Amino acid sequence: MELSKSRREFKRAKRLIPGGVNSPVRAFGSVGGIPRFIDSAKGARIRDVDGNEYIDYVGSWGPMILGHSHPKVLKAVRKAMASGTSFGAPTARESDLAETIRRALPSIQKVRMVSSGTEATMSALRLARGVTGRPRILKFDGCYHGHSDGLLVGAGSGVATLGIPGSPGVPKAMTDQTIIAPFNDLVATRRAFGRWGKQIAAIIVEPIAGNMGCIPPTPGFLEGLRAICDEFGALLIFDEVMTGFRVAKGGAQRLYKVKPDLTTLGKIVGGGLPAAAYGGRRDFMARVAPEGDIYQAGTLSGNPLAVAAGITTLELLEAPGVYETLAERSSTLMSGLAERAEARGIPLTTRSVGGMFGFFFNRGPVDSFAEAQQSDAAAFRRFFASMLEDGVYLAPSPYEAGFVSLAHKKRDIDLTLDAAERALARVARAR
Ligand SMILES: *Cc1c(COP(=O)(O)O)cnc(C)c1O
């Protein structure tokens, strides 16, 4: 595979940009090799600067649920652009987007637009702390909620602990307020509330974890979190930056029938442009400035191009059968992969919900970050490298979910499974 241009660009980028990338995982650190510099993308395919084409299961890490360069999205953005790119003043289209979001997610009565998922989660937490007057938050090991200080915490071993900073530059004082519990562990969560309950403003959770592979909630987990929050007067925040508009009409909260107090959205909500949002109960959202006293602002919030892309994407997702199609594609992909691994005696656990999927090179079950970490990293690296070489672009990390789009047709899935057959053969040979 010709890679000279990507190689040259990577070298140049590394002189100019930390690690040569503007977001760490793009650098292929955990898989090795040359990150592909992308030239263009259409439908289910991306093309790199050397002219290699790949079936893309990253989809810009989630937003491209319609496929790349969808003609209707491009048209809407072009039309918005012709009227100006940013005003820093309200537009009617922002209310259109708010209505579209509300239609999909009834737990959201009012919504505020921001520019990234990180901003959405940090703003939702500020609101939760402002509303409850409490300092602490509880998050789950392996869930990612953006890179803001208090959320960037790793955790210990299977028991609820206070967070330790996940990065230099994050003062301990910031993460002292963050309690960590294992995902899918109600006993540990309850224990944490037993100790700090009256100080906890909110639980924040990815209702389907997508930043440690794809790990759905075990039955009763989300319901249990709802009950604990109600008992202790804490807010329940569903971080649906990934899952909202990805797994079902109405997100994970509709799928599992659990109603959060606040929801954060991102990725798909911007249709491939920078937009995100947080919203929820009317009385809570009324505390956000200028209606209320809790400050939050943004120069490019509700940007007209992002709003146009977002509305168009969400409207197209309202068509009947969309999520059934996505679910069918990702489950065909995962069951095909599981069968082929089993035929070769390679331990593999696969998961899919709606348009997201994940696989772990271990026997499973995989219900927590600790269990996800039991997977065979070398097997993943081999599998990833072979797939890429064969024209299938998977997330370059064993701890990321994969995404199908509506542009992934049966033939793309078949081609992917053919490539998987060859990749698994390589994995088997190396064992
Ligand atoms: C991607 C993601 C974020 C962060 O969003 P950015 O737009 O990258 O800041 C937050 N939460 C979840 C669940 C995500 O998947």
Image (cartoon, rainbow, N blue to C red):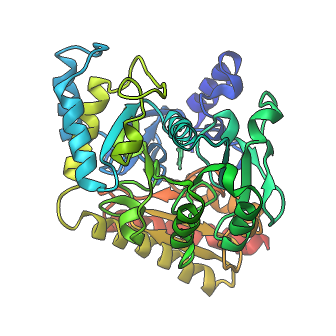
Residue 83, how many percent across, how many down? 17, 15
- The residue located at (43%, 67%) in the rendering is 258
Looking at the picture, does residue 394 appear above or below residue 353?
Answer: above
* Apparent side of residue 287 relative to residue 195 in the rendered image (left or right): left
What is the tally of numbered marks visible in this picture?
0
- The residue located at (74%, 45%) in the rendering is 153
- Tell me if residue 54 can be seen: no
Residue 302, how many percent across, how many down? 32, 27
Residue 419, how many percent across, how many down? 52, 65
Looking at the picture, does residue 39 appear above or below residue 191?
Answer: above
* Apparent side of residue 285 relative to residue 427 in the rendered image (left or right): left
The residue closer to the viewer here, 299 or 132, is 132
Q: Quadrant where the N terminus lies?
A: top right
Looking at the picture, does residue 66 appear above or below residue 214?
Answer: above
Q: Quadrant where the C terminus lies?
A: bottom right
- The residue located at (69%, 85%) in the rendering is 345
* Apparent side of residue 50 relative to residue 355 in the rendered image (left or right): right
- Tell me if residue 79 can be seen: yes
The residue closer to the viewer here, 383 or 58, is 58
Rendered image quadrant of residue 318: bottom left
Residue 200, how many percent across, how many down? 65, 51
